Amino acid sequence: DVYEKLHELGISLEAKGFATGFRVEHPQRIINRIQYGEEWGPSVVTGRSATDEVNKKFFDTLHEQDSSDNDTDSHHDGRLPVASYRLSTDKAFDGESVRGAYSFCMCPGGQIVPASTDPE
């Protein structure tokens, strides 16, 4: 075994910190609403018919619910890209030390690439 051989050669091993993560899925239409608001969210166009239809239906439904409160049409003809976001901090305290905490977006078909935040 590799570890036994290293031990025989007098090479010391030490535990190394590791990072773990998790994936949180938010529907794109929700991110569009949070980032662009109800006025501009419907202007998002991806070029993917299924995604665009869901986004349009979502905002149409919101506007129908709000129609009794607001009689103005807030439609824009712009073509905004899908909204994105990330969460990160380098001040997450785990009770012993300060660590970084990061989120990532994982699109279908994407790849998770292990990467260290430790410069050594």
Image (cartoon, rainbow, N blue to C red):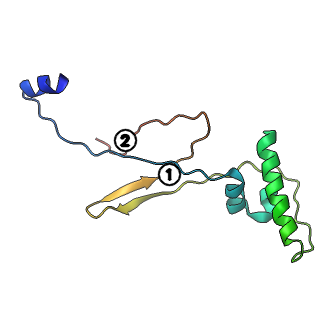
Residue drawn at x 84%, y 71% as measured from the top left:
66
Quarter of the view holding residue 37: bottom right
Quarter of the view holding residue 13: top left
* Sequence-first tag of 1 and 2: 1
The mark tally for this picture is 2
Place of residue 77 in the rendered image (x, y in percent of width and height, measured from the top left)? 88, 54
Q: Is residue 48 above or below residue 98?
A: above
Residue drawn at x 82%, y 40% as measured from the top left:
49
> Which element is circle 1 on?
loop
Place of residue 44 in the rendered image (x, y in percent of width and height, measured from the top left)? 78, 51
Residue drawn at x 53%, y 34% as measured from the top left:
111
Q: Which residue is mark 1?
A: 103
Quadrant placement of the N terminus: top left
* Type of amino acid at the residue the image marks with label 1: Ser
Place of residue 45 in the rendered image (x, y in percent of width and height, measured from the top left)? 80, 46
Q: Which residue is mark 2?
A: 116
Quadrant placement of the C terminus: top left
> Which element is circle 2 on?
loop
The mark found on residue 32 in the picture is: none
Neighbourhood count class around disc 1 (C-alpha, 10 Å): few under 14, some 14–19, many 20 upward: some
